[in-house]
Amino acid sequence: MDLKENIVGTKDIFDGFLFKIMVHDIVLPDGTRGNREIVKHNGGVGIIAVTPERDVFMVTQYRIAADEILLEIPAGRLEKDENPYNAAKRELEEETGYRAKELIPLGEYYATPGYCTEKLMIYLATEFEFKGQHLDEGEFLNVSKIPLDDLYEMVMQNKIHDCKTAIAVLKAKAILG
């Protein structure tokens, strides 16, 4: 069976700074009609920066949608048509103060594909130098270093609730041992 849903019309609902909301009129595989509410997002990047001592630079920040202070890898959204590699280098330096000499791609992941187009590109940084933190206006976070093995245990014990961070930790642990 062909599972593709075909869009036959779109209505724009909201066009904001971070995302756009639209409703697609669709034809389902069986020929019936339906609607899909979609959040259009430019995507984002996440960076797991691991020191030679196997410590990972992490950030904690309040996330209003979750109403929690979350432990996360440094991350940020892509500007329209921005190169993800360049965005990852920028975000790591902005949030932690460290500039990556090289980033290794760990994969691309949809955040919530049921209704959102946001795709996250995850990178591993193992070589970097301190340049100084410079947060965006209105951005408040704390930076810490946590051993990779401790983060792995936190993921396995469901103590890390951010998906991009969990994926990055698991991938880095698999690669670095």
Image (cartoon, rainbow, N blue to C red):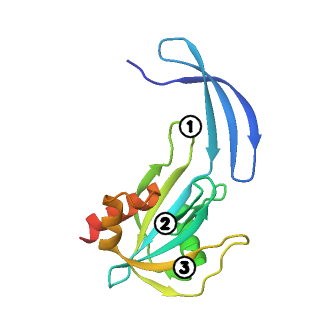
Q: Please say whether residue 131 is visible from this viewpoint.
A: yes
Considering the numbered disc 1 on the image, is that residue within a helix, a strand or a loop? loop
- What residue is disc 1 on? 115
Q: Mark yes or no: residue 106 visible.
A: no
Above-or-below relation of 41 to 121: above
What residue is rendered at 35% in x and 65% in y? 154
Q: Amino acid at mark 2?
A: Glu
Which of the numbered marks, if any, corresponds to residue 72?
A: 2
Quick one: label 2 or label 1, which is nearer the N terminus?
2
Location of mark 3 (residue):
96
> Which image quadrant: the N terminus?
top left
Residue 8 left/right relative to 88: right
- Marks 2 and 3 sit apart, C-alpha to C-alpha, by 12 Å
Compare marks 3 and 1 and give the one earlier in the sequence: 3
Mark positioned earlier in the residue sequence (2 or 3): 2
Q: Is residue 22 left or right of residue 50?
A: right
